[in-house]
Image (cartoon, rainbow, N blue to C red):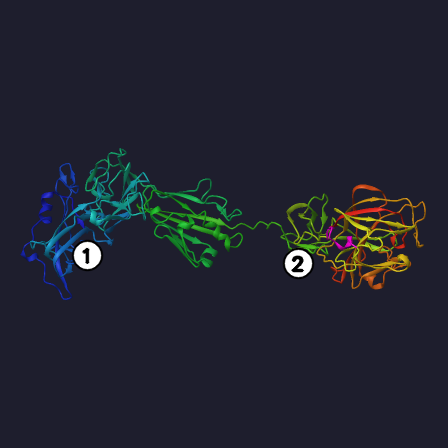
Amino acid sequence: MKTIYQAISIVLVALFASCNSDETNAPATPGGMTPVRFQAAVDTDDKTRANIDVDGDRFTGTWEEGDAMGVLYSVPGSSAFSEPGRFVYNDNAFAFEGELPTATGEWQYMAFYPHAAVSGNTASIPFGNLRSQKGSEFNCASDALVAEMLGFSNAKQGETDEGEPVKFRLNRLTSILNLSVQGGAGAGDAVRHILLTSENNGQPLSAQSIDFDISTLGADVALNAGARSNVIALGFDPGTAPAADAFEAYFNILPGNYDRLTFDVITEAKQIGTVTVTRDDPERKFAAGMLYRKEAADITFRPAEAPSLNWPDRELNDVHEITVDGNEILTYSAAITIDAPAGIAGLRIEVTSEFLNVMMGITGMDIFNDEAIQSNIGELPFSELELACTTQVQYKKSTVFDITRLLPMILMGSAENSLHVFEVHVTDLAGQETVQPLTFKVPESAPAPAEVVYNNDADLWTNTATLTVSNAALAASVLEYRAVGDEGWQTASLTANEDGTLTATIAPTWTPVQNGAGQTVQAVDSKTGVFAQKEYQYQLLVNETKAAEGTFTPANNSGDAIPVLATDLSCFTTDNTAAAFWGSGNNSMASKLCTFSSPYAYMQANEIIGILAPGNLFTGTFTFVKQGFLGATSYGTVGFGQKYTYTARPTALQLNYKASFGSKICTKYTHENELKEGDHDQASVMVCIINWDARHSVTSGNNGAPTGSWDPESLTGLSDAEKAGLIAYGAAYPDQDAANDTLLTIPLNYYDKDAGIPTGNYTIIISCSSSRYGDYLNGSKNSFYVKDFQWVY
């Protein structure tokens, strides 16, 4: 619909003329529908809000051929309203024509203009930021009108109860701004566009649509939430642009407050003149149905500045390296301000980038018209890239072209030193174009930082572990490690792998030494390798500079427990023939050789008529044979060895002891190391890690010299199989009185450092005696207390 600003006396004749007899509704058409004609006019009653009065003039109008009005109706027998029917204005009939169902009875009608989509009773009239006029004529494409609901109780389709055509009186929901220019400096130049701007962004002028409830006469009229903008660009139909010194321009806007409005008149000669309207008084609202005229006869025109780009703190024509932080975020802002005093009429970007063009399928972006980039991986919404587009850009005098989030994408697949050009094309409403290339470069990759990863493969029996080193050269690298709490660093061995990584191997250092009996044994440096109950730290030195560091803890790191001493163990009884772990030499003739004195195992020697029976505790079994008169030739046999499961290699055995030594030496059987009167006795603690199929038996008593006596240090008394299965041993011989707990640590000497975890029938021997040479019944009457056996790693 196009309406003309003219005297009301002329318009009323056309709008409110009565219909003659030729304008009655036509007969029903086949299918139950009948052509009908509706009359409609914009209400001009002085008491209505649709009355527009400017200095004695009224803004009225005429309908034009093809104008479409929407009509919702309920047919007789139903209260439900239809979808909006489309009724088109026939200039010859002075009426809107369409079809209604053929029926007589109770009809209701709701009408609005222009015809548009309706959801329920809510109409949505297009209310965008680009509008047009035919010369100085008003264009009602955004002129939302609504009529009061009409109802008739007994009428035919399209008629009143009296048989007259239904007439709608439409009320205007918007305000109309009128810029009226008569005279001034624009003679000889034509208007190209007029740009209306609300300087307060919180007071938008346009949107996707203006929405209102038809049934309430648009009392809830509001801008749709979509595509809101603070600008409206007004153009002219081809061939109708008015002269810059004589024109009328009209803008429908939503009623309300607008603090400051500017009209920028842009001419074909690329001149621009500005008219400002200031209404910052909250009480001065624009009202619905009212036209507000701004007359201007003295507009000053000036050359419209072409669009320009500004990148704060950077030169537009430089080549900018694309650098990102650890979160793949650009390390600088790529937000470029675009200023266009004559309003942005187009904004597109041509992209020259092998990666974006070929791999991503992105050759350009039209952020003026589009909301997303079409790419080979799908649609990339500009909103997700935080890139302003469509109504955030259209016809604005200034916007921000921000590709901060887009640029890191280039690093996904672009070659080092490759160039990527974003050529920005900005056009304004004056028809001026500015082209600005923005060039970006993928920098050479910085060397990847060295990395060290523990391979979670620590073997606590072999005491080895490995770590993988990446991004470091073998010749320049040293990997050091140590147990947390140690002071000095140890050095792992490094080897190169085919994939360019290095393997750092941590292994213990073994040293061959001669023991006291001249046997060669292996001593381990527990500060090297990895052991149970320790956490380790490491550092990688590249060219003597620390490049990486970290810590690791081997899995299953708690070590192995030795069964604790408790009052209910068989070793504190005289029945040790089937001892599960701890046994003793208690027997029916000497039942107190080993007793429990919580928390100790208390070994005390027994002397009867000069014959010594030492106290002992061991891992194994004991069998006693009583014989002879009053047991005079009795003897006992110890089976050394118990089954024990290892998960980690120990380096020592540790325990607490107390001791007191007698002075009288008793001797039953002569031997190489025999103690004689005046000598000082020793207690003994021996530990062996073995892998034996059978126990080693030692028999001692009053029936004869002991048999089976053995020494792990000298290997005497052992069979070849037992020697081969003797993995490690340790021995200590306390010889001083100790009234208080005394810590004893017995280092382990390894005969076979390469032996695997023992899995034989018998894998551990611990033997304690109150006299070192108790097998020979040689020694003094001593007391020896032991407790808290544990491995040292």
Residue 419 position within the rendered picture, expressed as x and y whole percent measured from the top left: 49, 52
Q: Main secondary structure of the magenta part?
A: loop
Q: Mark 2 or mark 1, which has the lower sequence index?
A: 1
Q: The residue tagged with tag 2: helix, strand or loop? A: loop
Give SS at disc 1. Answer: strand
Residue 551 in view in this figure: yes
Pick whichever, 248 or 405, lies toward us. Answer: 405
Q: Nearer the viewer, residue 719 or 149?
A: 719
Q: Amino acid at mark 1?
A: Arg
Residue shown at the point (42%, 50%) measured from the top left: 384
What whole-number distance in Å separates the C-alpha atoms at marks 2 and 1? 79 Å
Quarter-of-image position of residue 710: bottom right
Which residues are drawn in magenta? Answer: 563-573
Amino acid carrying label 2: it is: Asn
| Extreme residue in the left direction | 21
Q: Residue furthest top?
A: 281
Residue 344 in the figure: left or right of residue 331: left
The one of 614 and 104 positioned closer to us in this rendering: 614
Residue 643 position, x and y percent, is 75, 59
Callout 1 crowding tier (Cα within 10 Å): few <14, some 14–19, many ≥20:
some
Asked whether 725 or 491 is in front, the reply is 725
| Horizontal and vertical percent position of residue 589 | 85, 54
- Residue projecting furthest to the front: 630
Residue position for label 2: 497
Circles 2 and 1: CB atoms closer than 8 Å: no
